[in-house]
Image (spheres, grey):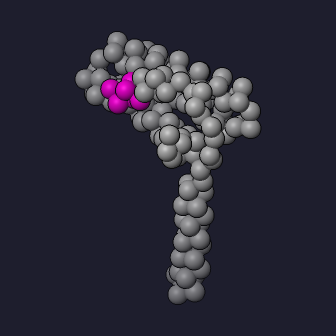
Amino acid sequence: MKLRQWAALAVAVFGLSGAWVYAEGIHVDLDLTDFDDDSMRDMDDANKDLQPVLGARNADAALADEQVIRNVLKQTEAYFTKKGGTDNAVKIAQQGEVSVSAVIAALGKNDFDTAAAAARDTAKNCRSCHDIYKPLTK
């Protein structure tokens, strides 16, 4: 590859990575004082517990964690739907529900590796919503 081609590729890569970092820095300031923090903490605890129980191949404990996560995601979807103007939050909650379903389906097949990968996707999904909507201070 010629020097000009490398330079053009480098500019494109750095330009795209800069746009990605900028997009990740978006934060929406909302009044979430009426949101159920206890449920969110329950979901956070279940997310933290999930990887170790999947590693231990404990399907029953993993399913219990997934049920907590699924219930809170449904509550979150309903909350943001009612609040309005937060279509991205609704979409993120729905994507989380799909990830949870993938974990449950994999557990039904005793495929703990696929379940663990889907559980990681679920956790990333949660973080993406928090990056945008979680209050910086409360």
- Magenta stretch in the rendered image: 44-49
| Residue 45 lies within the magenta run | yes
Q: Residue furthest left?
A: 56
Q: Is residue 77 above or below residue 5?
A: above
- In the rendered structure, the answer to whether residue 137 lies left or right of residue 132 reads left
Q: Toward the viewer: 84 or 60?
A: 84
Residue 14 position within the rendered picture, expressed as x and y whole percent measured from the top left: 54, 72
Residue 4 position within the rendered picture, expressed as x and y whole percent measured from the top left: 57, 86
Residue for point 29% across, 17% down? 58
- In the rendered structure, the answer to whether residue 68 lies left or right of residue 113 reads right
Residue 48 sits in quarter:
top left
- In the rendered structure, the answer to whether residue 31 lies left or right of residue 38 reads right
Q: Residue furthest top?
A: 60
Q: Toward the viewer: 76 or 11?
A: 76
Q: Is residue 17 above or below residue 122?
A: below
Residue for point 58% across, 42% down? 133
Residue for point 54% across, 65% down? 17
